[in-house]
Image (spheres, grey):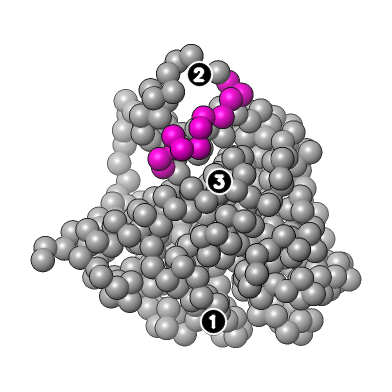
């Protein structure tokens, strides 16, 4: 059976006459028609790709709420021993909230229930509208969640989050290290989103601090924000049970390497890392094929953040549909690759011949 090869075209190409597109043309806007009113949500059944959720959100939200989310500079899987129905997860991402002028009617309930229905991992944001205890009460029977931690120099604060997560039944802590300071947020600045950097908290972004956190809880702690092979090696040497390749959705440092670039670098320079530790990834994912490429390189599961925030505007039905679309795309991509078992997927299915040249 002929096998189609996923081509990772990473060459720098100039499209002088091509305008910037927020999302590809899926025919969605033509389907809705020119008279579809601003501020109205299309029917969720009419959304057929993750990009459709982006357009629906942009049309529905006010500019400040959309800027908060948007600004930027199919098989079973196991994560830390917990079984899920698909190798994808909902990354920690806070809603715009009062400062952004939009809070979903049911807050994070759609994300919780959607993840439970689809049996995928949900990682609540530390600054979610729902508190850690509220999220715990809303979970389905046996539902597994991890808890995000933005560490502060105030160790009492950190201990409080760790203890609350443990009490709420979280199975791991996701220590976010890919947002040391605010980014140069042009869209955010235009719509007056406030700066949030506290210089004192920068001291928490060290491996010594990671050791200190590990001594404060018996929950596994996953560093989120690995952006190089050297950092990946450090995570392994520090005994991290897993780590997440991430550039925080490209929200903080323009030009930071994508999850795909970092995964490629690890594959090239230190492929043994994928065998020593569970490698997760998030950022830049919009299609099932994006997930399949990262899985082929060795990642255990792949997360999306803002896409699920867009889907959550519809509440639980939107999140459930977004998960189903991604599951279906993953399955179709695997079938077209000739892969009948996810365990067969490996880097031989990915063209690695093209690289950036500077």
Q: Give SS at disc 1.
A: loop
Q: Quadrant of the N terminus?
A: bottom left
SS category of the residue bearing label 3: helix
> Viewed as shown, does residue 24 lie left or right of 257?
left
- 100 or 76, nearer to the observer: 76
**Disc nearer the start of the sequence (1/2):** 2
In this rendering, would 345 be left or right of 50? left
Task: Please give the name of the residue rendered at 35% of the width and 58% of the height, measured from the top-left corner.
Answer: 330
State the image coordinates of residue 4 (x, y, percent, origin top left): 18, 59
Residue 68 higher or lower than 287, as above or below = above
Q: Is residue 38 above or below residue 65?
A: above
Q: Which residue is mark 3?
A: 317
Residue 336: x percent and y percent? 22, 58
Measure the alpha-carbon separation of dots 1 and 2: 47 Å
What is the tally of numbered marks visible in this picture?
A: 3
Question: Is residue 46 one of those drawn in magenta?
Answer: yes
Q: State which quadrant residue 138 falls in.
A: bottom right
Q: Which residue is mark 1?
A: 81
Residue at the image point whose x is 86% and y is 67% from the top? 157
Q: Calculate the distance from the C-alpha at mark 3 to the C-alpha at mark 2.
A: 22 Å
Give the spatial CA distance, label 3 vs label 1. Answer: 28 Å
Say if the magenta span includes residue 83: no
Q: Residue at x 80, y 64 (%)?
A: 133
Mark yes or no: residue 123 visible. Answer: yes
- Give the numbered dot on residue 36: 2
In the image, 105 versus 180, the foreground residue is 105
Q: Nearer the viewer, residue 248 or 5?
A: 5
The outermost residue toward the top is 35
- Residue closer to the observer: 180 or 108: 108
Front label number (3 vs 1): 3
Q: Which range of residues does the magenta coloring cover?
A: 38-49
């Amino acid at each position: 059976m002929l096998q189609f090869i996923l081509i990772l075209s990473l060459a720098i190409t100039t499209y002088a006459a091509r305008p910037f597109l927020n999302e590809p043309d899926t025919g969605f806007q033509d389907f809705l028609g020119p008279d579809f009113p601003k501020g109205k949500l299309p029917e969720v059944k009419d959304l057929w790709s993750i990009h459709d959720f982006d357009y629906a959100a942009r049309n529905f939200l006010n500019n400040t709420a959309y800027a908060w989310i948007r600004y930027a500079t199919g098989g079973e899987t196991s994560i830390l021993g917990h079984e899920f129905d698909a190798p994808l997860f909902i990354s920690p991402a806070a809603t715009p909230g009062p400062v952004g002028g939009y809070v979903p009617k049911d807050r994070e309930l759609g994300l919780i229930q959607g993840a439970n229905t689809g049996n995928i991992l949900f990682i609540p944001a530390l600054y979610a509208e729902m508190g850690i205890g509220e999220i715990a009460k809303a979970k389905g029977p046996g539902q597994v969640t991890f808890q995000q931690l933005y560490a502060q120099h105030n160790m009492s604060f950190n201990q409080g989050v760790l203890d609350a997560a443990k009490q709420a039944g979280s199975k791991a802590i996701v220590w976010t290290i890919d947002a040391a300071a605010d980014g140069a947020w042009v869209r955010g600045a235009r719509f007056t989103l406030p700066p949030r950097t506290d210089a004192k908290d920068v001291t928490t972004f060290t491996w010594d601090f990671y050791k200190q956190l590990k001594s404060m809880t018996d929950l596994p702690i996953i560093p989120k924000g690995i952006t190089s092979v050297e950092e990946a090696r450090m995570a392994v040497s520090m005994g991290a049970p897993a780590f997440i390749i991430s550039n925080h959705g490209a929200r903080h440092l323009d030009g930071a390497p994508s999850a795909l670039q970092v995964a490629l670098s690890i594959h090239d320079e230190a492929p043994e890392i994928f065998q020593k530790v569970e490698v997760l990834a998030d950022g830049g994912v919009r299609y099932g094929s994006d997930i399949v490429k990262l899985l082929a390189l060795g990642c255990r599961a792949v997360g999306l953040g803002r896409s699920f925030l867009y889907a959550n505007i519809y509440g639980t039905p939107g999140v459930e549909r977004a998960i189903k679309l991604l599951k279906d795309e993953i399955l179709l991509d695997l079938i077209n690759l000739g892969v009948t078992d996810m365990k067969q997927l490996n880097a031989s299915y990915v063209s690695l011949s093209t690289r950036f040249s500077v």
